[in-house]
Amino acid sequence: GLGETLASANEPGTPYRLVVQKAKPNAVKILSLASFSRALEDAEGGPIAKSIDYSKEKLSTDRSFLEKFARDVAEVAVKVEEAYGTPMDMEGVVLENSSGREVHLVQARPIVEG
């Protein structure tokens, strides 16, 4: 997917940027939709760069799907911030499978003002 593309900053483009209101009704504001040309895909022998067709990406074509996705990720983020009692910088992975959506937190650290 886009994880390595985002982390390496080797590809020009913009990630999905969303803001979710922490208080109910958890309104979602879309700041930008993704615009990367390529993503990495698993292949025999290692990952390969593959062109992205955003007309087939549900995050780009289905607003209600995108908003539910954003709320699901925000729900995890709010729980982490509540547990630590401070704003956190978080990274994670979202998996879509036959049993539903899984949001996995990879790492979290307090936001420190420089």
Image (tube, grey):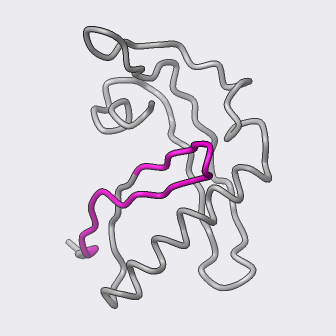
The C terminus sits in image quarter: bottom left
Characterize the magenta stretch by its predominant secondary structure: strand
Residue at image position (33%, 74%) is 88
**Count of number-bearing discs:** 0
Decide: is 42 above or below 19. Answer: above
Residue at image position (57%, 19%) is 52
Residue at image position (48%, 71%) is 76
At which x and y percent is residue 11? 38, 23
- Indicate the quadrant where residue 19 lies: bottom right
Residue at image position (27%, 32%) is 8
At which x and y percent is residue 26? 69, 75
- Indicate the quadrant where residue 10 lies: top left
At which x and y percent is residue 27? 73, 71
Decide: is 61 above or below 104. Answer: above
Q: Is residue 54 left or right of residue 4?
A: right
Q: Is residue 104 magenta?
A: yes
Who is closer to the viewer here, 56 or 103?
103
- Indicate the quadrant where residue 43 lies: top left
Q: Is residue 24 left or right of residue 19?
A: right
Instruction: Name the residue at the front extreme.
Output: 99
Decide: is 72 above or below 100. Answer: below
| Stretch of the chain drawn in magenta | 93-111
Who is closer to the viewer here, 40 or 38?
40
At which x and y percent is residue 97? 57, 43
Instruction: Name the residue at the top extreme.
Output: 45
Instruction: Name the residue at the left extreme.
Output: 114
Q: Is residue 74 left or right of residue 81?
A: right
